[in-house]
Image (spheres, rainbow, N blue to C red):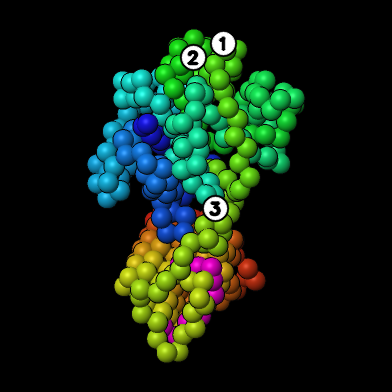
């Protein structure tokens, strides 16, 4: 089998964080979401991976390279415009050939990985396997309607009146029949070739499409609130360790990761949390569900339930920062007049003087 990761799109829902950065490279628990997707595919035994790229393709190429760090082979597939998931499959035919493959959206995080799914599909005679999960607002997703036997009856993209609450998770498995499907469908009202229409074509033309209902958590990290939730979930599950320096005046919980070169000085870190490489905490408090990325300095400040990206400086902030995403190379410092609370989503290279 081969892997296909979709990493196009502009990430507008995450602006300003993604104004000049690929959304798939924003880190969750100090690791870019795209890297987590590559690892999940590799752990499932697949080492030949294509990545569909768009406007942010050069940044993704620079970050991922040839895949050597994961012991996989990476092939980049340019998509001239975001014309739909089925279009991404269509332009990847030369890479995929007649091999079975798994398609994984590059900004999705799923609990438990995909190894079990891959084993099921590889050992079956199914033409496709789709992953479904129950959601609160199915009108925002592609939705599946199942019949009395649990088989897929129909699929609808973002329906106004959803027939069920079973949403398509961004993980799909196909055999070669999908190429006939994507070449047979027409663009939707959005001007895109919808993967739901392609799977519906498979169903209507007698192909075996197996639904798998995922019982764990799954998050599309397309919005700031979802990015924070994904950070929470991953931090709660990763194995924590201390590879950096913690001085005798600091207190660090056992659910905290201190990465190489980080320094914790006269500070408190309550987990789950992660402090990145060469970061420095001085006279500060880092609360649960917080990720501090590499080369960031936090001094005389408090942060909780937040993500702070690399090379940022949070200094002398008089009130606790919480529920926030702070971009790269951001400075947040003290100004004379104090508000009671701050809630921020700051893009890369921002400068904020707090009043």
Would residue 162 be seen by someone viewing this image from the given angle? no
Residue 112, given in percent of the width and then of the height, sits at 52, 49
Q: Residue furthest bottom?
A: 248
Q: Are marks 2 and 3 in contact (CB under 8 Å)?
A: no
In the image, 276: left or right of 213? Answer: left
Mark 1 or mark 2: whose residue is earlier in sequence: 2
Snapshot quadrant of residue 67: top left
Would residue 29 be seen by someone viewing this image from the given angle? yes
In the rendered image, which residue does mark 2 sit on?
181
In the rendered image, which residue does mark 1 sit on?
205
The magenta segment:
265-274
Q: Are marks 1 and 2 in contact (CB under 8 Å)?
A: yes
In the rendered image, which residue does mark 3 sit on?
230
Question: Which residue occupies 69% across, 28% down?
Answer: 150
Judged from the image, the secondary structure of the residue bearing numbered disc 3 is helix
Question: Which residue occupies 61% across, 41% down?
Answer: 214
Judged from the image, the secondary structure of the residue bearing numbered disc 2 is helix
Residue 299, given in percent of the width and then of the height, sits at 44, 77
């Amino acid at each position: 089998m081969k892997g296909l990761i979709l990493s196009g799109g502009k990430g507008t829902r995450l602006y300003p964080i993604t104004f000049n950065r690929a959304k798939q490279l924003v880190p969750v628990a100090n690791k870019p979401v795209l890297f987590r997707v590559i690892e999940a595919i590799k752990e499932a035994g697949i080492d030949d991976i294509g990545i569909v790229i768009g406007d942010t393709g050069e940044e993704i190429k620079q970050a991922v390279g040839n895949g050597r760090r994961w012991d996989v082979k990476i092939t980049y597939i340019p998509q001239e415009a975001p014309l739909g998931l089925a279009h991404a499959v269509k332009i990847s035919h030369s890479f995929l050939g007649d091999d079975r493959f798994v398609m994984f959206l590059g900004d999705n995080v799923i609990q438990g990985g995909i190894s079990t799914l891959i084993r099921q599909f590889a050992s079956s005679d199914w033409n496709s396997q789709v992953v479904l999960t129950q959601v609160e607002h199915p009108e925002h997703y592609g939705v599946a309607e199942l019949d009395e036997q649990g088989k897929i009856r129909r699929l609808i993209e973002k329906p106004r009146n959803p027939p069920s609450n079973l949403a398509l998770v961004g993980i799909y498995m196909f055999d070669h029949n999908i190429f006939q499907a994507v070449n047979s469908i027409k663009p939707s009202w959005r001007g895109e070739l919808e993967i739901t229409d392609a799977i519906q074509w498979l169903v209507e033309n007698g192909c075996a499409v197996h639904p798998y209902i995922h019982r764990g958590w799954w998050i599309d990290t397309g919005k700031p609130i979802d990015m924070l939730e994904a950070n929470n979930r991953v931090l709660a599950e990763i194995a924590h360790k201390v590879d950096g320096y913690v001085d005798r005046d600091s207190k660090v919980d056992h659910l905290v990761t201190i990465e190489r070169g980080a320094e914790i000085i006269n500070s408190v870190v309550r987990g789950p949390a992660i402090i990145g490489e060469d970061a420095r905490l001085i006279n500060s408090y880092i609360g649960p569900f917080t990720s501090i990325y590499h080369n960031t300095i936090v001094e005389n400040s408090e942060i909780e339930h937040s993500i702070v990206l690399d090379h940022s400086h949070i200094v002398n902030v008089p009130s606790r920062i919480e529920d926030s995403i702070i971009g790269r190379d951001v400075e947040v410092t003290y100004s004379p007049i104090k508000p009671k609370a701050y809630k921020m989503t700051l893009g890369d290279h921002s400068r904020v003087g707090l009043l």
